[in-house]
Image: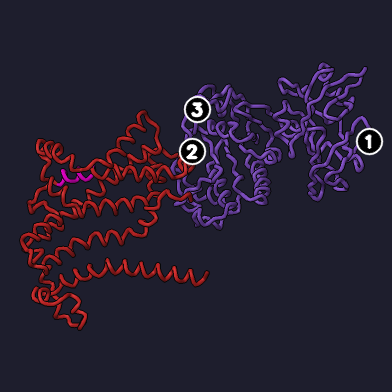
C-alpha cells in the first residue's frame, strides 16, 4: 500500500514537473532571445547562451530600446495598462454590487433578470459588434478608451455577476443577519462583511478579467482601431508580425513585454486564486 | 430593560402558516424558553421579534413600543445564533465591538465594554484571535459577548448550545442561567431540547405546528400539561399513553383496558374533579415512566392489585442509578424507569406498580387534559 502511494506521488510529481517545463521552457526561450543581439538570434539557438552563461557581453537591451522607441511599444504598453486596469475594475466593481443585490435582496422580477444575465454569458460577442459600433459612431465613443472600457465591462459582466452571486449566496445568512442586528445598514453589510469575505472570489475574478482584457485583440481592434495613440500591445504586436516578420529578436522582446504584466498580476493574486476557484464548492 | 408582548401574531410563508395567532407576554427580566419539535415555528417567532422576518398579522411590542415596522437595528435587541455567526475576518475584539462601532460609540468606551464582557465570560486572553482559532465553546462565549456589550433591552437566543458537545452544553447551560441572574435582562431562548427548557426557563412556551400549546413555569408544564402534545413532549423518556375506559363503581373510578385495571386515587379525583364527568367514557391515560416501578422493589408507595399490572419485559437498559424497562401490555408498548435494584430480565413477566396519583387523563377527541 505504501509503495503504491509512493509510486502515485512520484507519478504526480513527474506530471507536474513536465507541465511546469512545458510552460517555462518556451517562456525562458522568449526572454533569452529578447536580450540577444539580432545576429545571434538568427544564427544560433537561445539555449546556446548556457555554454557560458556568465558572459555578459552576449546579452543586450537593444531589442527593447528599439521596440519601445521605434515600434511604439511603449505607448502600446501604456494603452494596455489603461485599458486593462479600468476594463477590469469597472466590471468587477459593478458585478460585486449587482451580485450582492441578486443574492441578498428581494425585489420584483429578480429571478427573471438574473435569468437574462445568465443567458447573456452564452451570447457570442461577435453578434454585438455591428449594432454597438453603430451606436458608438453616433455618440462618438468609437476609438476612445471609454468606449472599449464600456465594451469590456458589458462583455465581462454576466460571468462576473454569476460567479460573485454564487459566492455571496454561499456565505451564511446568519452572518448578514447578525450584522443587521448589530446595527449595520445594507451598504455597511456590503462593505464590511460581504466584500472582505469575498477577497478570494474577487481576486480570481480580477485575474480572469485582467487576463482576458490584456490578451484581447478582437474587441480592441473593433472599437479602437489600429491608431498608435490608443492601440494596446496585442494590436501593436499583431502589426509587428506583419512589418517585422523576420525580426525574431524584436518580436520576442515585444512578446515578453506583453507577458510580463499578466504574470505579475497572477503571481500577486495567486494565493487567493486557488481558494477562489473552489469558492462555494465545499461547505466550510 | 423591557418586556416583550406578542398579540395575535401570525406568520405565513405562501400558503404555509408557520406561526398562528401567537399571543404571549414576556415580563421584563424574565427568561422565557420557546420549545417544540423541528418546524414548530419557534425560530420563526424569535426571528419576528428580532425583525428578521416580517409579521403577516398581529402586533409585537418591546416595552411599550410597537416594533412591527422597525428594522432589527432599531429594536434594541441582541441575538445569539445557533452557529455563532461570528465575522470570520475580524478578531474577537472587533467581533464584539462591531455593533458599538457602527453605533459610533467612542473608542475608549468600546474598549472598556468589550474588556468587561470578556472578563465576565472568561475570554480576555482570546481578544486578538480570529474565530477560526477558537473552540466551539469559546466561539459561543464570543457570540454571547457580542450580545452583552450592546447592553440591549432583550436578548434573543436561537438554539445557542446545540452545536456544543454534551458536557460543554451542561456547563454553558448553568453559565447562561448565572449570566441571566447577573444581567437581569429579558431573554427569549429557543431550543428543541426540553432538558434545556426545563432547567433554564422561568417560563416555557411549548409550540407545535405554529400554535402555542401551553405557557407555564417548568414544573407546571411537567405536572399539569394542558394536552397530550405537551404531556408527551415534556419529560424524558416521554409519557406513556394508553387508550382506556373510565369505569365508575359507586364512588370509585377505574381505568380499564389493554390488560390493565387501575383504581384512580382519591387525591387525583380531588385534584381534578373534571374526571368524574367522563365516567364510563373512553379516554386516554397518560403515565410518566418515572411514575411506574417494579412492584417487587417499589419503596415509594404501597403496591396492591388496584395500582399494579403485569407486563412483558422487552428491553432492559441499565443506566446505573436506575433502569429503563421497555415493556408491553397487550399490544401497547411503554417505558418504565424502575429502581436499580430491579431484577427484571428480557422476556420476564413482571408486575409494574403505578403511582395512581400521578395519572393523567385526556379527552380522546380533543386530546385536552381532563381537569
Can the viewer see residue A116?
yes
Front-most of residues B277 and B49: B277
Q: State whether discs 2 and 3 lie on one chain.
A: no
Are there few (<14), some (14-19), or many (20+) residues within 10 Å of tag 1? few
Asked if the residue at tag 3 contacts the one at tag 2, i.e. Cβ–Cβ closer than 8 Å, the answer is no
* Alpha carbon separation for disc pair 1 and 3: 55 Å
Query: Would residue B96 appear left or right of A10 to someone viewing this image?
Result: right
Look at the image and give the residue range highlighted in magenta: A145-154
Residue drawn 45% across the image and 49% down it: B107
Is A153 a magenta residue?
A: yes
Residue drawn 68% across the image and 46% down it: B174
Are there few (<14), some (14-19), or many (20+) residues within 10 Å of tag 2? many
Front-most of residues B186 and A219: A219
Secondary-structure class at tag 2: helix
Query: Would residue B84 appear left or right of B34 to someone viewing this image?
Result: left
Quadrant for residue B22, please give it. Answer: top right
Using the image, tell me which numbered label, if any, was put on residue B302: 1
* Alpha carbon separation for disc pair 2 and 3: 22 Å
Query: Would residue B130 appear left or right of A34 to someone viewing this image?
Result: right
State the residue position of label 2. Answer: A181
The answer to whether residue A208 is above or below residue B242 is below
Using the image, tell me which numbered label, if any, was put on residue B238: none
State the residue position of label 3. Answer: B13
Residue A141 percent location from the top left of the image: 12, 41
Work out whether mark 1 precedes mark 3 in sequence or the reverse, and give the earlier one.
3
Chain letter of mark 3 equals B
Asked if the residue at tag 3 contacts the one at tag 1, i.e. Cβ–Cβ closer than 8 Å, the answer is no
Chain coloured purple in the rendered structure:
B
* Alpha carbon separation for disc pair 1 and 2: 58 Å
Q: How many marks?
A: 3
Chain coloured red in the rendered structure:
A
Secondary-structure class at tag 3: strand
Amino acid at each position: 500500500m505504501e509503495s503504491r502511494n509512493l509510486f502515485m506521488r512520484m507519478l504526480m510529481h513527474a506530471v507536474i514537473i513536465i507541465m511546469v517545463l512545458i510552460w517555462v521552457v518556451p517562456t525562458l526561450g522568449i526572454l533569452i532571445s529578447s536580450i540577444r543581439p539580432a545576429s545571434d538570434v538568427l544564427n544560433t539557438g537561445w539555449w546556446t547562451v548556457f555554454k557560458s552563461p556568465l558572459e555578459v557581453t552576449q546579452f543586450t537591451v537593444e531589442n527593447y530600446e528599439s521596440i519601445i522607441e521605434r515600434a511604439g511599444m511603449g505607448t502600446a504598453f501604456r494603452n494596455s495598462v489603461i485599458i486593462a486596469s479600468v476594463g477590469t475594475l469597472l466590471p468587477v466593481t459593478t458585478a460585486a454590487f449587482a451580485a450582492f443585490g441578486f443574492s441578498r435582496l428581494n425585489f420584483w422580477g429578480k429571478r427573471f433578470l438574473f435569468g437574462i444575465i445568465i443567458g447573456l454569458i452564452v451570447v457570442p460577442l461577435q453578434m454585438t459588434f455591428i449594432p454597438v459600433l453603430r451606436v458608438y459612431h453616433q455618440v462618438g465613443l468609437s476609438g476612445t478608451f471609454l468606449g472599449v472600457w464600456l465594451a469590456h465591462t458589458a462583455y465581462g459582466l454576466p460571468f462576473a455577476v454569476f460567479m460573485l452571486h454564487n459566492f455571496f449566496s454561499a456565505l451564511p445568512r446568519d452572518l448578514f443577519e447578525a450584522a443587521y442586528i448589530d446595527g449595520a445598514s445594507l451598504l455597511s453589510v456590503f462593505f464590511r462583511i460581504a466584500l472582505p469575505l469575498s477577497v478570494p472570489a474577487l481576486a480570481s475574478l480580477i485575474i480572469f478579467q485582467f487576463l482576458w482584457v490584456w490578451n484581447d485583440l478582437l474587441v480592441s481592434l473593433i472599437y479602437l482601431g489600429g491608431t498608435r495613440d490608443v492601440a494596446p500591445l496585442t494590436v501593436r504586436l499583431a502589426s509587428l508580425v506583419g512589418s517585422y516578420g523576420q525580426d525574431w529578436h524584436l518580436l520576442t522582446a515585444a512578446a515578453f513585454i506583453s507577458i510580463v504584466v499578466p504574470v505579475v498580476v497572477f503571481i500577486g493574486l495567486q494565493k487567493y486564486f486557488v481558494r477562489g476557484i473552489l469558492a462555494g464548492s465545499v461547505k466550510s | 430593560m423591557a418586556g416583550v408582548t406578542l398579540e395575535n401574531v401570525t406568520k405565513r410563508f405562501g400558503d404555509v402558516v408557520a406561526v398562528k395567532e401567537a399571543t404571549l407576554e414576556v415580563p421584563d427580566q424574565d427568561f422565557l424558553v420557546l420549545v417544540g419539535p423541528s418546524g414548530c415555528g419557534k425560530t420563526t417567532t424569535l426571528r419576528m421579534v428580532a425583525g428578521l422576518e416580517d409579521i403577516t398579522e398581529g402586533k409585537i411590542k418591546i416595552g411599550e413600543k410597537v416594533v412591527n415596522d422597525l428594522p432589527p437595528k432599531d429594536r434594541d435587541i441582541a441575538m445569539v445564533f445557533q452557529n455563532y455567526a461570528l465575522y470570520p475576518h475580524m478578531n474577537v475584539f472587533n467581533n464584539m465591538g462591531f455593533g458599538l462601532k457602527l453605533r459610533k460609540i467612542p473608542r475608549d468606551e468600546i474598549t472598556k465594554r468589550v474588556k468587561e464582557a470578556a472578563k465576565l465570560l472568561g475570554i480576555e486572553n482570546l481578544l486578538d484571535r480570529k474565530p477560526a482559532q477558537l473552540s466551539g465553546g469559546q466561539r459561543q462565549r464570543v457570540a454571547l459577548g457580542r450580545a452583552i456589550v450592546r447592553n440591549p433591552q432583550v436578548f434573543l437566543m436561537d438554539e445557542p448550545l446545540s452545536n456544543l458537545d454534551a458536557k460543554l452544553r451542561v456547563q454553558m447551560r448553568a453559565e447562561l442561567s448565572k449570566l441571566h441572574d447577573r444581567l437581569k435582562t429579558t431573554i427569549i431562548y429557543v431550543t428543541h431540547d426540553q432538558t434545556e427548557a426545563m432547567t433554564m426557563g422561568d417560563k416555557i412556551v411549548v409550540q407545535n405546528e405554529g400554535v402555542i400549546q401551553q405557557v407555564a413555569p417548568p414544573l407546571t408544564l411537567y405536572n399539569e400539561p394542558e394536552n397530550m402534545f405537551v404531556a408527551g413532549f415534556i419529560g424524558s423518556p416521554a409519557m406513556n399513553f394508553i387508550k382506556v375506559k373510565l369505569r365508575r363503581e359507586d364512588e370509585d373510578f377505574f381505568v380499564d383496558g389493554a390488560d390493565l385495571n387501575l383504581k384512580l386515587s382519591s387525591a387525583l379525583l380531588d385534584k381534578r374533579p373534571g374526571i368524574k364527568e367522563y365516567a364510563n367514557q373512553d379516554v386516554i391515560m397518560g403515565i410518566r415512566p418515572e411514575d411506574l416501578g417494579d412492584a417487587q422493589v417499589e419503596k415509594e408507595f404501597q403496591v396492591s392489585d388496584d395500582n399494579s399490572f403485569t407486563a412483558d419485559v422487552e428491553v432492559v437498559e441499565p443506566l446505573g442509578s436506575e433502569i429503563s424497562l421497555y415493556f408491553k401490555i397487550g399490544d401497547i408498548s411503554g417505558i418504565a424507569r424502575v429502581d436499580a435494584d430491579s431484577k427484571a430480565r428480557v422476556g420476564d413477566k413482571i408486575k409494574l406498580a403505578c403511582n395512581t396519583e400521578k395519572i393523567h387523563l385526556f379527552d380522546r377527541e380533543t386530546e385536552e387534559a381532563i381537569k
